[in-house]
Structures are given as C-alpha cells and as structure tokens.
C-alpha cells in the first residue's frame, strides 16, 4: 500500500517516526513546555505544517485546474517558502527582496510572477538577471519602464475589480480600467512585448463571490480585445482574496465552485492556464501565537463610560506587533491556556487586553470574556498566519515573536497526490516537533470569545 494513500492517522505515524523533534500529547502540553522555555518577555508563533498541507489538499480538491502562486508577502518565513517549493508551487513576489527569499529557498525563477504593477528599475534589472520573466503591468508608464530595463519579459495586464465586500479594496491603487485595455495592449504591441494574459485581485478577504465572477466576465472581454490586436492570451490570473481561517472552510468550498463555473463558462476551450495568488488562504490558520500575561489590573467598579470590564490584562505583544487591525475578520480570538482543574476554580470576567508598549492606543481587545488570569499565564491566538509576523515593528524595542514549527495530527489529511512525499516528510521531520492532538479538540483549553464588535 502506498503510505500516502492511507488516512491521516497513518500519515501522522509516518511523520512521527521520522521526526527529530520532541513529541507532545496535546497542544496544552506543548505550549506549557514552550512557554516555560521562552520566558515572559518573549511571544512566539507556532506554525503547524500539517495545516499547510491540509490547505494544499483543499486547494487541489476544490481548484484542480487553478495553479497556485503563493503570495510571499503574506508570510515570508523560510521554512514555509521551502515547503511551498517542495509542493511545486509558484510564487507571487512584489519586490526584489521577495524574489531573493524564494530563490534562497531553492525556488524556480520561472515559477515566479513579479506581480507588483509598480517596480523599481533595480528590481527589473534583478528580475532579468535571474530569469524571473513573468511581470504584471497596468499603465503606459510601467510599460515604458519595463521596455527600458527588461524588454524580453512576458507581461500580464492587471485590470480593476469591483472589490465589493472586501477588507482592502486594492483596485483603488492597482489595475487599469477595462476600457483602457485596448490602448495599453496596442502600445505593448508597438513595443514588441509578449503579453500573455490578464490578472485581477478582488481585495483581501472577499465575502462576495459575484466580485470574482463579474471580474472573470470582464477579463474574458479583455481576452477578446487582445485577440483583435494580435495577441493570443494563455493565462488567466484570478489573484486572491480567500479567507484563511478554519472557520471559513465551508465558504471556501462554495466560493471555489462559483469561480470554477465562471472559468469554465468564459474559457471552455481548455487553452487557457488558470493561476491564482493566494497567501492568507495557505497560512492563515497554520499559526498560533502564544502571548504571556505580564501585568494585571482589577476594576472594582464600572468606569465613567459604564464599561462592564472588570479585569485588564497586559500581554507581551500588541498593536505594534502582531495585532495591527481587523482581528475579527481574520477570526482571531483569545484562548486561555488553563487546565480543567484550574478552570473550575476561576470566575469568568469581562476583560480588556492591552499591548505592552507605552502607547495608549496599544489595545489588543477592548472587551472579551476570560477566566481570572495570573501573571505568567499564556493566552493563545489562532489564525495568526497572514500578514501578522511580517508587519511587526520593534516600537519601544519589544522583542518580535519567535517562531516554532510543529506537525499536528489531522485525521482529514490525504497525501496520495504528492509525488515527492518522502522528500517533504523528511524536510518536515528536520524542523518540526510532533503534537498528537489539535488544541481545538483539547478540553483543557478554554475558548474565550469577543463580546463586543471591534
């Protein structure tokens, strides 16, 4: 029997036998041990590489005809980049630095799309020197710049998307209007560029499938315009905007079906390659941040505004670190790491969580329900993989979160589609500890919740 065709339990056993790391029964045990090792000053991220493989499996099952280019900006961790290289993925890079990070992870420059529509001359020269030849543009000025620095590049025209019901409307900054496509493509033809396709990005965390399908319809019209000019487009890049949390898996299934139907309707002849640039989707749910309570303040009565908060906690991370904004939209909630026996003796209080800097705006959560906690205890935060660690600052010289790697048992994992399973398993075994039970099903961890919209 092919070991990769077995269920998730058998796959977990294989990784366990190969692992050179420590083995833990539960995430509760893992975080208790690691928290003690790290100390109260040091927050740390734990990346579950099994979760990344699960997302890869979900993508393959729901987007079998859409090739992923991982968006490096979401989380440029070198272990993650190497894993995506081993999975055979492409990479969406926006800067010279991101291209270098992918190449350091032994990525193939031919599988990189330099997707920022505004690139520096130096960045273009570097891309040319390493053979990263697939570039995005959306303006006359960018075309002329590319022509000067990298005239042999293959280009993709980025168009605007309606970007309704998204957290970040990227079309305010990037993409041309569809009615400008004819002018830009005609200019590209005059400059002897090889334009190969169309791209768009609906914006981060898109909740409206019609935004995708409407822009795919619009892209089809650009394909037809290109054909009249003399181009035969072969790439349709649907960008990203997919949620990355475990709580949004059902929506991902629904969204993928609508996108697949739209692609099939608009491009039925099978000559077009579909690609996407997901970042948050692949890494969002893979990371759990561990923070330590470094201070506590009790409120004996309501404040002048009538706030019901009775406890205030200060943690060793904050607004200038991992908690920059939109926690509720990324499904980020606190979990108190307290054993069942301890929890039975503690009262739940309406609580506020502050970051540790001297800034009065450094508030992590205005109001939530938490058990009465003590200094030195841990608060865990799931779904912390996307755009968190990469946007941390060292304001007031607080330490950035450290990074740990685990492989957590996932009964749904099937890896029979991997042609290089042994290579991937060996790599993960070198870097990851083993955890037998996911914290979501671990009764010893108390799931707390927001009680107020952020």
Image (cartoon, rainbow, N blue to C red):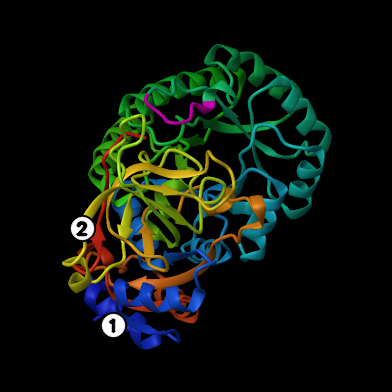
User: Height in image: 99 above or below 327?
Assistant: below
Q: Residues within 10 Å of mark 1 (few under 14, many from 20)?
A: some
Of marks 1 and 2, the one in the foreground: 2
* Furthest residue toward top: 179
Does dot 1 land on a helix, a strand or a loop?
Answer: helix
User: Height in image: 146 above or below 396?
Assistant: above
Spot occupied by residue 450 in the image (x, y as percentages of width and height): 29, 43
N-terminal label among 1 and 2: 1
Left or right relative to 23: residue 279: right
Please indicate, yes or no, whether residue 110 appears anywhere in the rendered image: yes
Q: Which residue is mark 1?
A: 13
Asked if the stretch drawn in magenta spans residue 309, the answer is no
Location of the C terminus (image quadrant): top left
Spot occupied by residue 148 in the image (x, y as percentages of width and height): 83, 33
Residue 17 image-quadrant placement: bottom left
Q: Nearer the viewer, residue 45 or 263?
A: 45
Q: Residue at x 38, y 67 (%)?
A: 377
Q: Residue at x 29, y 36 (%)?
A: 452
Q: Which residue is mark 2?
A: 347
Q: Residue at x 52, y 32 (%)?
A: 199
Spot occupied by residue 378 in the image (x, y as percentages of width and height): 38, 65
Q: Residues within 10 Å of mark 2 (few under 14, many from 20)?
A: few
State the extent of the magenta-drawn residues as a range.
165-170
Is most of the magenta stretch helix, strand or loop? loop
Spot occupied by residue 400 in the image (x, y as percentages of width and height): 59, 60
Residue 301 image-quadrant placement: top left
Is disc 1 in contact with disc 2, using a CB cutoff of under 8 Å?
no
Left or right relative to 88: residue 211: left
């Amino acid at each position: 029997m092919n070991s990769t065709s077995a269920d998730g339990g058998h796959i977990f056993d294989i990784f366990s036998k190969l692992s050179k790391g420590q083995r833990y029964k539960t995430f509760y045990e893992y975080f208790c041990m690691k928290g003690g090792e790290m100390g109260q000053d040091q927050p740390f991220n734990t990346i579950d590489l099994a979760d990344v493989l699960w997302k890869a499996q979900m993508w393959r099952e729901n987007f079998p005809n859409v090739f992923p280019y991982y968006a490096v900006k979401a989380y440029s961790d070198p272990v993650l980049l190497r894993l995506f290289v081993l999975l055979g993925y492409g990479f969406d890079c926006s800067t010279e630095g991101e291209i270098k990070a992918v190449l350091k992870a032994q990525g193939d420059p031919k599988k990189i799309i330099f997707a920022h529509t505004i690139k520096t001359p130096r960045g273009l020269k570097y891309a040319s020197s390493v053979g990263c030849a697939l570039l995005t543009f959306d303006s006359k000025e960018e075309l002329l710049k590319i022509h000067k620095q990298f005239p042999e590049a293959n280009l993709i025209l980025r168009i605007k998307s309606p970007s309704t019901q998204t957290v970040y409307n990227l079309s305010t900054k990037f993409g041309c209007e569809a009615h400008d496509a004819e002018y830009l493509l005609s200019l590209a033809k005059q400059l002897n560029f090889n334009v190969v396709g169309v791209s768009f990005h609906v914006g981060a965390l898109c909740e409206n499938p019609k935004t995708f399908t409407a822009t795919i319809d619009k892209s089809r019209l650009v394909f037809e315009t290109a054909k009249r000019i003399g181009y035969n487009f072969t790439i349709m890049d649907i960008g990203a905007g997919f949620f990355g949390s475990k709580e949004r898996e059902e929506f991902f299934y629904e969204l993928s079906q609508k996108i697949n139907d739209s692609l099939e309707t608009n491009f039925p002849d099978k000559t077009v390659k579909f690609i996407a640039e997901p970042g948050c989707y692949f890494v969002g749910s893979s990371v759990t941040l561990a923070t330590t309570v470094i201070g506590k303040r009790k409120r004996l009565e309501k404040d002048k505004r009538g706030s019901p908060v009775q406890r205030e906690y200060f943690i060793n991370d904050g607004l200038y670190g991992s908690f920059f904004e939109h926690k509720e939209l990324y499904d980020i909630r606190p979990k108190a790491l307290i054993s069942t026996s301890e929890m039975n003796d503690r009262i739940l209080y309406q609580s506020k969580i502050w970051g540790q800097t001297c800034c009065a705006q450094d508030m992590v959560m205005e109001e939530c329900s938490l058990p009465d906690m003590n200094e030195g205890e841990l608060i865990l935060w799931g779904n912390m993989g996307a755009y968190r660690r990469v946007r941390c600052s060292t304001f007031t010289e607080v330490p950035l979160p450290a990074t740990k790697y685990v492989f957590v048992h996932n009964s749904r994992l099937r890896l029979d589609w991997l042609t290089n399973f042994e290579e991937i398993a060996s790599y993960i075994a070198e870097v990851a500890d083993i955890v037998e039970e996911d914290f979501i099903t671990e009764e010893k961890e108390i799931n707390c919740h927001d009680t107020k919209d952020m």
